[in-house]
Amino acid sequence: MHTTSDYQQTLDYLYERLPMFSRIGKAALKPDLTNTLKLCAGLGDPHLKFKSVHIAGTNGKGSTSHALAAVFQQAGYKTGLYTSPHLVDFRERIRVNGVQISKEWVVDFTKRIKPLIDEIEPSFFEITVAMAFAAFAEQEVDIAIIETGLGGRLDSTNVITPLLSIITNISYDHKDLLGDTLPQIAAEKAGIIKPGIPAVIGEQHDETERVFFERSVSLQSPLYYAQGYWDMVRVKQDARYQYYKAINKLNQQMLDVCTDLTGNYQQHNIKTVLTAAELLSFQGFNISAAGAIEALKNVKGTTGLMGRWDWLQEQPAIICDVAHNTAGLTEVLQQWKNVAADKKHIVMGFVKDKDVAQALALFPKDATYYFCNAQIQRALPAMELQQTAIVAGLTGAVYSSVEAAVNAAMNSMGGNDALLITGSFFIVGEALMVREWNASDTVKLTYTAK
């Protein structure tokens, strides 16, 4: 029987022994798939022992992964889910039927693989991918939903041959690693498309369409555009749910969708999930649009998704979102405009390798800001963030930690104020640990959809 300290010691070993992107940035990345293939070989090639769906994209891949996992779970399939990064607990990365792998399993796996770690010297991400594949093979999942970490072509997850590849969207992020044009970034993401394997593209862009088309033709991989199959019209919205009319463009059928994915941007992900569900039903899975819509009601409860336009409290309103690049923040701040409040507060922090000045230009000048940085090496120091924010016309104080920033904001909020916590996964993750958040179903909602 392992203790909590055994688990913590194991995490300390993984975090400190292995190069970790969230801590040190691009220096942690390995330029090919060699280490992952060696790790898998040492574990008996677990990645060949389960069926999978592979999901890449600049934004939305986490929500899409969780929603598709919910669809399979709702249909009764034993479903693995691998995502990254985690927000609160490392084990969020690896789930089976929404349940995180056990602390004991993490400890035992790490002990078992230490000789391989010493021999191969993999990155932290390469180890977590191998760990996920081993867990899914051991638990004999019916399907595993695998989210890429960064890019696609050289991402450690790209050793699988899935039943379906999904690319949610393309926008600018990690330009130093993936390229500084949309076609270059698309080419990296398109690396997950495999010969003869169908692929779904969530959102179409004129600049990237040719990249996907040429890749699909060269590999004889059928290409499906979610926008060509579904239209979504929002009917109503509150802090807990969004309500849509979903129109199937092929048969003109109209379906009612109620989902606990409350971000405006989720309509794109829902189209992608509905398209994927239909394509996977042709591959022998007993899933349908009606079943997918049923699953969309409770994605968070089914899979444990957190941090996507997440209402932590309803009065005063406290919302968090992991948006961390220009495209993601544009969507979030558009929705933030529609939150009714006497006064608005924003806790923010970024990592060093983002275009922070471009991101800050999106933020409203009439909010009170609380600048902070997460407790990772890669974090942009809060003082530097404040200086850049001042140039953008944003005013606020610097705080020594995310916890201090959140507490300061909460202490200064009136009953009809609203707080947004955003800028990176790590800011939101540390904010979630500040206290036990329990949004009440009974308090008056302050959100007005437009």
Image: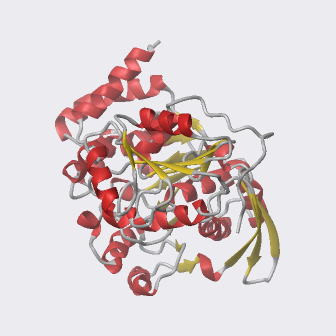
| 242 relative to 269 in the view: left or right | right
Say which quarter of the image contains residue 15.
top left
The image position of residue 331, as x and y in percent, is 53, 66
Residue 320 versus residue 279: which sits nearer the camera? 320
Q: Which residue is painted at 28% across and 45% down in the image?
A: 383
Q: Residue at x 45, y 87 (%)?
A: 206
Q: For residue 111, what is the image quadrant? A: top left
The residue drawn where x is 41% and y is 66% is: 326
Quadrant of the image containing the C terminus: bottom right
> Can residue 339 be seen by looking at this rendering?
yes
Q: Is residue 378 left or right of residue 216?
A: left
127 to the left or right of 256: left
Looking at the image, which is closer to me, 393 or 170? 393
How many numbered circles does the render carry?
A: 0
Measured as percent of width and height from the top left, residue 39 is found at 29, 43
Residue 384: % across, % down: 26, 50
